[in-house]
Image (tube, grey):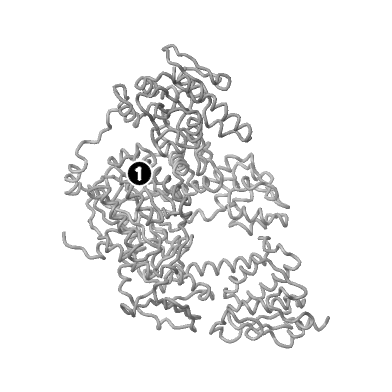
């Protein structure tokens, strides 16, 4: 194989990394470089430095250290049986590239992952070495997200957490059966154990130590994971059940859903079609309902025997149409939990409603000023001078809302 | 009356610069105290707005309210004050308003000063004005604030430095065109982020410079003052086109967050039209490309790293296990009931194989599930402490659970314990029986109802029967008591203490029984 230069490697190893959905650079501890005199800061909210034409944000330099891999996961472009071009960065190249990009304000930091070469420990050791050099030699205070190889040793995990803001381990697929079928060398049991170990470590280190009363740094941005959607037959209900379990069990910051995307040189065991982007979008909405809107996982899909989210309307509207008996809700009296159930009222809007109504009674037009559009909201609320009358129970309500909601055509 | 109507802008306030908040604040306070109505004031930014005012100087000397008018206003009050605190009649506005108004002032809307004064005016009678999100002035205020915030955020995102010079002469220079007057407000962010770098951000209105020690500002510049290229941009473009997935084209989503007005200063933007135009063909090619034969090295990799075919190992039910260690190993892959699906791992018993007493709890909890060890969570801590107090030698005890996977309901970031049902208890009894057969204890302590049900094969009223010993048909002695988590659930401190005392008495009884 001819020697590749940095640019050629970058082309191969960023192409290989693009199927990872996560690009978040938020949630880490606040720090900046005024004390260290180096470069880099994290101020809570991450910054998206660019957007690709796929609409996804580019916040981090997201690359693999190498795309050589001993695993043969059929959904992955880097599986050992794939004919994709292979490349391997040196630790030095990744460090230089990260610093060069960061200094030009292209990125918030680095998201480094890797195919597994030789052994999990050797691979993980190289990832950790990149992070260590950035922190200790380059005085780099930007964001670092390391993908963790589940089978690696506890020592390496400890070191990774010292240098990185976030660690992640991908569960890959929503069910253990799916993993066994599509990623035969991966062990779901080991993945769970690693996530459990990470949670324990993150919690242990977030307590101030007895001696110094200071907290030790350990992956202050928490851990996250990713599931591929649409590569196996798991319905949305199963996916959400897995998410709920993962959030509860391992205190994940995020579960990312990645619509299975056709990959060049795909394995024949996979659906070769356009990625189900709308389904992915609905799953994210449902995920939000569980995390910020007080919905239990089994509520979101109650009364949907196929266990699939409605692609045409958002999951909260779908739920409300199935539970019309609790509507309309009085925006001047209802409590927060109830208001959060109203289609079209986001968490921020609900907070504004609660604040404003201390001072004046809200009319329908007031609500209209606070939220995006009234089309979804109107049938489900009463306000000063407004009652939806028979609208709430109208059989054709769904069609009516769908036709008046233009944003649906965005996708 | 007639005069006032004719002279609507009786007061003109000259501000020294576009973001001269100090002068606005000073003038606004005096005008409001002087009872000057909002429609009587005109706000004018003097000169071309640059060089920008120094934030420390404020008031008449720089900002200058039209002199005679102001004198009239001020004379009816006390002398001009420092910050309003020592003045007679006071004007109080929420601190939040001042903080947010400083942001709004950065907007390029010429009406912003008037809006802020109108709100200040109204706030005298409506102190909670800011909380009324449906008010038109508040909405305008919020819209301006949001636009400035967004511009600040986009500047942080889209400034692109170009490197000039090397070694000691290394400098990074960017050309950026913000929509609002945000350079001064935003510069400290770049200082915090790029402390160790010497940099300049040039914009049409104002330029910021950092030399690793001091932040300075100079008047606006021209695009030609910034470097025209940087070798690293080729790498950045390479990254940009390869991180893009053509199968997911969503240009509207891209433009919503990265509006075209920013494109002209982004080195990656010239690639966009070509990437968009080629996306469909590229995606189709990915889908249509027939799967090929495995890569040449694949067989070698498989042979080296995965030598044995990975068909599911015949599930070991532990029937032939000769030690607790073997039994534990076998239980790792237990599928006798569905609880393994949601749990992290099987939590097996722990302790010496020749233990004289075996404690049986209900099931592992959140902490036990993570650690893989029984009784390490809050209930385990109570258990340990009481056992210690009772003088029971832990080295002679084996601790396990009736059910070996954690059963729970996820609730946000927590897991709420749920009680195992009869089927699950029955399924897991397989393992408990084998643990007892291997350890052959002289006494088994059932901690709670689930353990009792598993050991006795039927439900027993545990609170009534606690402290009793029952001899099973096979001669095994079972001592009944509560589960230590019961103590944790009691709210009332006195009741809690009493219950703990009863549990201690039970453990003392256990200690006695161990000796017999």
Quadrant location of residue B41? bottom right
| Residue B382 on image: x %, y % | 51, 34
Which residue is rendered at x = 39% and y = 44% of the image? A197
The front one of A224 and B137 is A224
- Residue most toward the top? B473
How many numbered discs? 1
Instruction: State the residue at coordinates (55%, 53%).
Output: A405
Q: Position of residue A267 (x, y in %)?
A: 27, 45
Q: Which chain carries label 1?
A: A
Q: Quadrant of the C terminus of chain B?
A: top left
Name the residue: 40% across, 83% down.
B225
Q: Is residue B326 above or below residue A249?
A: above
Q: Is residue A13 left or right of residue B347?
A: left
User: In the picture shown, does residue B210 fall above or below B134?
Assistant: below
| Residue A361, image quadrant | bottom right
Q: Based on the displayed image, in which of its 4 quarters is residue B118 positioned?
A: bottom right
Left or right: B414 in relation to B97: left
Q: In the displayed image of the protein, which residue is found farthest to the bottom?
A: B68
Q: Is mark 1 on a helix, strand or loop?
A: loop
Residue A210 placed where, x, y %?
47, 50
Give percent across and percent down for residue B385: 50, 34
> Dot 1 surroundings within 10 Å: few (below 14), some, or many (20 or more)?
many
Query: Residue tagged by mark 1?
Result: A231
Up-down: is A322 above or below B95?
above
Query: Position of B71 compared to B217: left or right?
Result: right
Q: Can residue A78 be seen in this view?
A: yes
Query: Is residue B288 among the parts visible in the rendering?
Result: no
């Amino acid at each position: 194989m001819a020697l590749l230069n940095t640019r050629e490697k970058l082309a191969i190893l960023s192409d290989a990394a693009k199927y990872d959905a996560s690009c978040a650079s938020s949630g880490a501890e606040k720090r900046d470089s005024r004390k260290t005199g180096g470069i880099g800061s994290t101020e809570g909210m991450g910054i998206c430095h660019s957007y690709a034409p796929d609409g996804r944000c580019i916040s981090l330099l997201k690359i693999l250290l190498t795309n050589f891999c001993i695993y043969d996961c059929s959904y992955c472009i880097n599986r050992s049986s794939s004919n994709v071009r292979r490349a391997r960065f040196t630790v030095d190249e990744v460090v230089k590239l990260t610093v060069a990009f960061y200094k030009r304000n292209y990125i918030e930091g680095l998201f480094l992952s890797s195919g597994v070469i030789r052994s999990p420990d050797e691979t993980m050791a190289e990832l950790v070495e990149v992070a260590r050099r950035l922190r200790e030699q380059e005085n780099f205070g930007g964001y670092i997200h390391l993908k963790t190889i589940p089978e690696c040793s506890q020592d390496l995990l400890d070191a990774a957490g010292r240098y990185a803001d976030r660690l992640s381990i991908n569960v890959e697929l929503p069910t253990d059966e799916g993993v066994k079928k599509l990623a035969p060398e991966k062990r779901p049991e080991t993945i769970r154990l690693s996530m459990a170990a990470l949670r324990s470590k993150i919690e242990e280190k977030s307590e101030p130590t007895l001696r110094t009363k200071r907290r030790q740094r350990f992956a202050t941005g928490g851990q996250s994971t990713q599931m591929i959607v649409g590569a196996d037959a798991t319905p949305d209900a199963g996916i959400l059940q897995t998410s709920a379990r993962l959030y509860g069990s391992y205190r994940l910051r995020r579960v990312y859903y990645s619509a299975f995307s056709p990959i060049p040189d795909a394995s024949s065991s996979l659906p070769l079609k356009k990625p189900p982007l709308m389904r992915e979008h609905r799953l994210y909405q449902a995920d939000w309902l569980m995390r910020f809107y007080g919905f239990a996982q089994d509520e979101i899909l109650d009364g949907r025997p196929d266990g699939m989210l409605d692609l045409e309307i958002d999951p909260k509207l779908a739920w409300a149409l199935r539970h019309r008996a609790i509507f309309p809700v009085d925006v001047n009296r209802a409590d927060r939990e109830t208001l959060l159930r109203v289609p079209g009222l986001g968490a921020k809007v609900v907070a504004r409603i609660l604040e404003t109504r201390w001072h004046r009674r809200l009319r329908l037009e007031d609500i209209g000023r606070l939220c995006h559009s009234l089309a979804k909201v109107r049938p489900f609320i009463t306000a000063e001078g407004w009652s939806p009358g028979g609208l709430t129970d109208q059989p054709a309500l769904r069609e009516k809302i769908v036709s008046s909601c233009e944003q649906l055509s965005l996708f | 009356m007639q005069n006032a109507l004719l002279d609507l802008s009786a007061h003109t306030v000259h501000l020294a610069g576009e973001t001269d908040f100090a002068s606005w604040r000073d003038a606004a306070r005096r005008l409001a105290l002087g009872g000057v109505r909002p429609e009587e004031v005109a706000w004018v930014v003097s000169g071309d707005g640059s060089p920008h005012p120094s934030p420390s100087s404020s008031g008449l000397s720089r900002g200058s309210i039209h002199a005679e008018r102001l004198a009239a206003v001020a004379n009816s009050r006390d002398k001009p004050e420092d910050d309003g605190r020592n003045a007679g009649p006071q004007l109080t506005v929420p601190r939040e308003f001042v903080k947010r108004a400083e942001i709004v002032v950065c907007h390029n809307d010429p009406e912003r000063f008037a809006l802020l004064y109108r709100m200040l005016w109204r706030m005298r009678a409506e102190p909670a004005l800011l909380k009324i999100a449906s008010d038109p002035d508040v909405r305008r205020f919020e819209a301006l604030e949001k636009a400035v915030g967004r511009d600040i955020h986009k500047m942080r995102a889209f400034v692109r430095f170009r490197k000039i010079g090397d070694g000691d002469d290394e400098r990074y220079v960017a050309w950026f065109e913000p929509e609002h007057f945000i350079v001064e407000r935003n510069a400290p962010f770049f200082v915090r982020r790029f402390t160790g770098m010497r940099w300049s951000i040039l914009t049409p209105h104002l330029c910021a410079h950092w030399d690793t020690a001091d932040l300075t500002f100079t008047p606006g510049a021209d695009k030609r003052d910034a470097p025209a290229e940087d070798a690293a941009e080729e790498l950045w473009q390479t990254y940009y086109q390869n991180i893009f997935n053509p199968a997911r084209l969503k240009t509207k989503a891209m433009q919503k967050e990265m509006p075209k007005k920013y494109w002209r200063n982004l080195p990656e933007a010239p690639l966009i039209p070509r990437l968009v135009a080629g996306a469909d063909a590229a995606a189709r090619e990915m889908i249509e490309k027939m799967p090929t034969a495995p890569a040449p090295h694949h067989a070698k990799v498989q042979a080296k790293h995965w030598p044995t075919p990975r068909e599911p190992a015949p599930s070991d039910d532990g029937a032939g296990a000769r030690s607790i260690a073997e039994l534990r190993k076998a239980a790792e892959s237990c599928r006798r009931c569905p609880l393994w699906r949601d749990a992290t791992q099987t939590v097996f018993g722990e302790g010496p194989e020749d233990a004289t007493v075996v404690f049986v709890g209900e099931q592992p909890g959140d902490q036990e599930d993570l650690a893989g060890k029984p009784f390490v969570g809050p209930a385990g801590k109570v258990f340990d402490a009481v056992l210690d107090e009772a003088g029971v030698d832990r080295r002679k005890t084996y601790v396990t659970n009736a059910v070996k996977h954690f059963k729970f309901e996820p609730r946000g970031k927590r897991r709420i314990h749920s009680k195992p049902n009869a089927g699950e208890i029955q399924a897991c009894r397989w393992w408990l029986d084998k643990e007892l057969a291997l350890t052959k204890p002289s006494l088994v302590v059932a901690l709670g109802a689930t353990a009792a049900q598993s050991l006795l094969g039927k439900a027993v009223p545990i609170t009534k029967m606690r402290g009793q010993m029952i001899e099973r048909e096979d001669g095994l002695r079972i001592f009944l008591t509560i589960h230590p988590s019961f103590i944790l659930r009691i709210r009332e401190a006195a009741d809690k203490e009493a219950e703990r005392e009863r549990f201690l008495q039970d453990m003392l009884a256990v200690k006695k029984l161990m000796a017999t």
